[in-house]
């Protein structure tokens, strides 16, 4: 069973350690919980391990055709272009914001079976990758806002916090 950690919980602000693949039981549990979140709601596009309380560099997301995939120790190795992305976050319920993202990005990671992969993404999938990787660095979508937009979004987020 899993619980999604909600803003303003400070565990969302921790810079994550590399995904521990040596502890097979922990790794399997983290991956299973991440995939369960995606399976439970087809509208969820991605989730990162710190949102479930694991300070590991592991994310789950839907690919371009909606299949769930695991990325371990993902890192953006190149990016280009720009776009405005409308984003929500399971850890910040009730808040949807428009934020700047790169239009294209290339990510190097291990897949769920620990095979190396390079993923080229654009548009919505690139935005999802960047959003989830932000979680691994202790950043939230709110951090991409400024001024009154940030104040309004933080106020709304706190209103939904239980």
Image: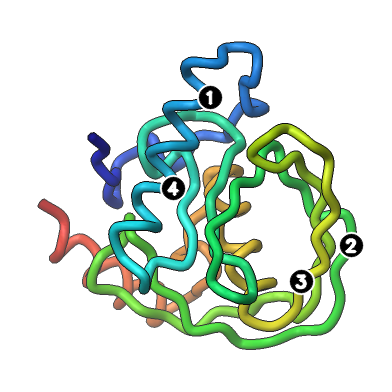
Q: Can you identify the residue that label 4 sits on? A: 35
CA gap, disc 1 and disc 4: 12 Å
* N-term-proximal mark, 3 vs 2: 2
Residue at 53% across / 51% down in the picture?
A: 60
Q: CA distance from mark 3 to mark 2?
A: 11 Å
Q: Nearer the viewer, residue 7 or 20?
A: 20
Answer yes or no: do the residues labelled 1 and 3 have beta carbons within 8 Å?
Answer: no
Q: Position of residue 147 (x, y in %)?
A: 45, 77
Q: CA distance from mark 4 to mark 2?
A: 26 Å
Q: Secondary structure at mark 1?
A: helix
User: Which residue is most to the left?
Assistant: 162
The N terminus - image quarter: top left
Q: Nearer the viewer, mark 4 or mark 2?
A: 4
Looking at marks 3 and 4 on the same chain, the residue that comes earlier in the sequence is marked by: 4
Q: Nearer the viewer, mark 3 or mark 2?
A: 3
Residue sticking out furthest to the top: 23
């Amino acid at each position: 069973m899993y619980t999604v950690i909600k803003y303003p919980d400070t565990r969302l602000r921790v810079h994550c350690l590399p995904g521990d693949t040596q502890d097979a039981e922990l790794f399997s549990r983290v991956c299973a919980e991440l995939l369960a979140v995606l399976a439970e709601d087809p509208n969820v596009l991605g989730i990162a391990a710190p949102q479930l309380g694991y300070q590991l560099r592991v994310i789950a997301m839907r690919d371009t055709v909606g299949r769930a995939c695991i990325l371990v120790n993902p890192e953006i190795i190149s990016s280009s272009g720009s776009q405005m992305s409308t984003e929500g976050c399971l850890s910040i319920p009730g808040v949807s914001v428009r934020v700047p993202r790169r239009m294209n990005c290339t990510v190097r990671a291990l897949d769920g079976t620990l095979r190396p992969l390079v993923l080229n993404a654009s548009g919505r999938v690139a935005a999802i990758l960047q959003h989830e990787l932000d979680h691994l660095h202790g950043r939230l979508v709110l951090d991409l806002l400024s001024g009154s937009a940030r104040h309004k979004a933080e106020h709304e987020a706190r209103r939904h916090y239980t």
